[in-house]
Amino acid sequence: MELVVDRLSKQFQSKLAVDRVSLRLSPGVTGLLGPNGAGKTTLMRLICGVLRPTAGTVTFDGADVSAEDYRAILGYLPQDFGYYPDFTGLDFLLYMAALKGLDKAAARRKSLGLLDMVGLGDAAKKKVRTYSGGMRQRLGIAQALLNDPKLLVLDEPTAGLDPRERVRFRDLIAALGRDSVVLLSTHIVSDVEHIAGRVLIMKAGQIVHDGAWDAGEDLEKFYLAQFGGEEDDG
């Protein structure tokens, strides 16, 4: 099981947002950090097929990012995921499950289980517009897991969560990394420090650091030494 990113580039008019990035990711959690405008979100959108690359390829076990087989194994939580405010939480997951091709019985069973798992079981029949920001984020995490993805791409998954919720979801993401390829981008360096076995740092569209990370080391100190406290948000 392997995600292969080969010489991937994305040009937006005069800006080269992703510059010839090559990666091979195996099961486990890989953290992605970088200062504002580094290209992290663009890279994740390319990996998820939301954007088409200017050059290069993305494959998972040989399936191209544009193929149905690739989409079937992908779970994606964008930084600002779209939701339908007048849907209930359960209705939203059932709708997303239908888009992912789950049959009705499996979709309902999976949706209810995920709502319980993310702590929204009691709010399953409440409309999403009544949810707090943290509740909506938990709903986004649930939709990303509907199809038991082998490739899970998470852009700021703990944004809007309180400290207790963040710890809970760090544990969940770590568990998912045992059997899936998980790419996690966040501005919260401690989230990466606690659960990622490998850390990527982007700057100006390129990967400037790629290595295994020892949980006993101080990742935030290392990161700040590299970027002088530049804002990590892009």
Image (spheres, rainbow, N blue to C red):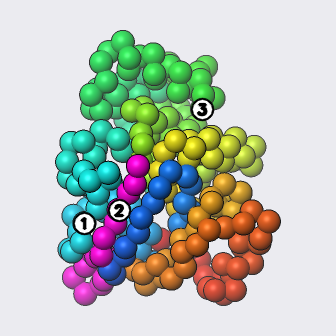
Q: Picture quarter containing residue 90?
A: top left
The one nearer the camera, 155 or 31, is 31
Q: Residue 47: x percent and y percent?
A: 34, 59
Segment tinted magenta in the rendering: 1-18
Residue 227's tag is none
Q: How far is mark 1 from mark 2, CA to CA?
A: 8 Å
**Mark 1 closeness class: few <14, some 14–19, many ≥20 residues within 10 Å:** many
Is residue 109 within the magenta segment?
no
Q: Amino acid at mark 1?
A: Thr
Examine the rendered structure and indicate whether residue 150 appears above or below residue 191: above
Is residue 16 within the magenta segment?
yes
Q: Residue 165: x percent and y percent?
A: 69, 42
Tag 3 residue: 118
Kindly identify the residue that appears in the image at 27 percent across and 32 percent down.
Answer: 99
Q: How far is mark 3 from mark 1, CA to CA?
A: 34 Å
Nearer the viewer's eye, disc 3 or disc 2?
Answer: 2
Q: Is residue 133 visible?
A: no
Identify the mark nearer the N-term, 3 or 2. 2
Residue 57's tag is 1
